[in-house]
């Protein structure tokens, strides 16, 4: 059990973790910090945190567990703010979707505390954001990816693993670069594609009429385009190289489909569709009952 958790960023991801830990009796006290006073008020009202800190330093001081639940683009700044106030035995963990940039920020900002940092990515979320949507069951049965750096000490890594397992998660360890490449393909690019499709339709002359006729297939495909724009802008830019690589691969695939249509090549088009359809039919999202990676 942790005695004092410092929750830096009171949104859905961090709030859900705090609620889950409180329910499992894994933490005695949660102190939250957010630059948004309304988020802190709601977090207290909902029982996510016990107290609100006026500064990052106030939250981190005396904490034996520090969680960074902030946009990936501000990770470096927040780490720099909290580094002077860290206890030498505290664990620091993030919950962001990109890992190489976060590890680089920790190595630059944390100095002698860098070994206490455990990069984590829980594979869970919603298309909505904010503390109002915090859910203690968000992570149950889901996978959590840990991407330790060479500097990460074994003790904090083992404690982080035990924490997530106690919350009902399956923990997997990955190389940071492999993580960013994988999630550019299966998470970040799908979000960008949903945004791009919406953007494409919105800028056509008959956009309103087109959208009025859209059905469940369009709804399902574009659901994630309702996700927080600022969060996903930061993810795309922080994982820029992998995003560009995956974008090139998608464009090449689209061009292959387009060429088959332009050439009226029914056999090639059917083969392309069948290959994708069969793969999708056989795929199952990984859970605690399924040992495949997402």
Image (tube, rainbow, N blue to C red):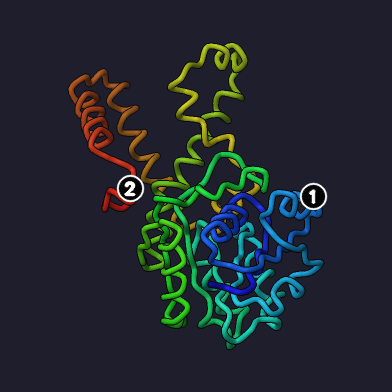
Q: List x then y, in percent, for residue 65.
A: 59, 73
Q: Mark 1 points at which residue?
A: 38
Q: Nearer the viewer, residue 8 or 184?
A: 8
Residue depicted at 59% across the width and 35% down the height:
226
> Circle 2 sits in a helix, a strand or a loop, which is it?
loop
Q: List x then y, in percent, for residue 210.
A: 55, 14
Q: Which of 221 and 142 is in front in this view?
A: 142
Q: Residues within 10 Å of mark 2 (few under 14, many from 20)?
A: some
93 is higher (above) or lower (below) than 261: below
Q: List x then y, in percent, for residue 31.
A: 70, 66
Query: Who comes first in sequence, dot 2 or dot 1?
Result: 1
269 is higher (above) or lower (below) than 13: above
Q: Mark 2 points at which residue?
A: 286
> Circle 1 sits in a helix, a strand or a loop, which is it?
helix
Q: Which of 161 and 294 is in front in this view?
A: 161
The answer to whether residue 244 is visible is: no
Would you say 202 lies left or right of 38 here? left
Residue depicted at 58% across the width and 80% down the height:
90
Would you say 12 lies left or right of 38 here? left
Q: List x then y, in percent, for residue 213.
A: 52, 11
The answer to whether residue 193 is visible is: yes
99 is higher (above) or lower (below) than 58: above
Residue depicted at 64% across the width and 84% down the height:
87
Circle on res. 280: none
């Amino acid at each position: 059990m942790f005695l004092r958790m410092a929750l830096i960023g009171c949104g859905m991801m961090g709030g859900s973790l705090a609620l889950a830990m409180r329910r499992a009796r894994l933490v005695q006290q949660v102190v939250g910090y957010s630059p948004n006073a309304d988020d802190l008020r709601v977090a207290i009202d909902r029982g996510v945190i016990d107290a609100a800190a006026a500064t990052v330093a106030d939250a981190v001081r005396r904490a034996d567990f520090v969680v960074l639940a902030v946009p990936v683009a501000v990770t470096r700044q927040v780490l720099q703010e909290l580094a002077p106030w860290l206890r030498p035995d505290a664990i620091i963990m993030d919950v962001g979707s990109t890992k190489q940039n976060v590890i680089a920020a920790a190595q630059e900002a944390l100095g002698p505390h860098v070994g206490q940092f455990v990069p984590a990515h829980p594979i869970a979320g919603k298309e909505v954001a904010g503390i109002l949507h915090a859910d203690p069951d968000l992570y149950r049965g889901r996978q959590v990816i840990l991407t330790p750096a060479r500097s990460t000490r074994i003790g904090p890594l083992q404690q982080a693993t035990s924490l997530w397992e106690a919350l009902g998660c399956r923990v997997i360890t990955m190389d940071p670069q492999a993580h960013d490449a994988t999630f550019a393909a299966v998470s970040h690019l799908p979000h960008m594609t949903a945004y791009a499709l919406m953007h494409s339709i919105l800028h056509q002359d008959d956009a309103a009429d087109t959208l009025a006729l859209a059905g469940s297939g369009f709804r399902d495909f574009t659901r994630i385009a309702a996700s927080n724009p600022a969060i996903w802008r930061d993810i795309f830019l922080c994982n820029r190289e992998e995003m560009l690589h995956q974008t090139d691969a998608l464009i090449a695939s689209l061009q292959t489909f387009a060429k088959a249509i332009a050439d009226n090549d029914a056999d090639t088009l059917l083969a392309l569709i069948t290959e994708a359809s069969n793969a999708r039919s056989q795929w199952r999202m990984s859970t605690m009952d399924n040992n495949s990676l997402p």
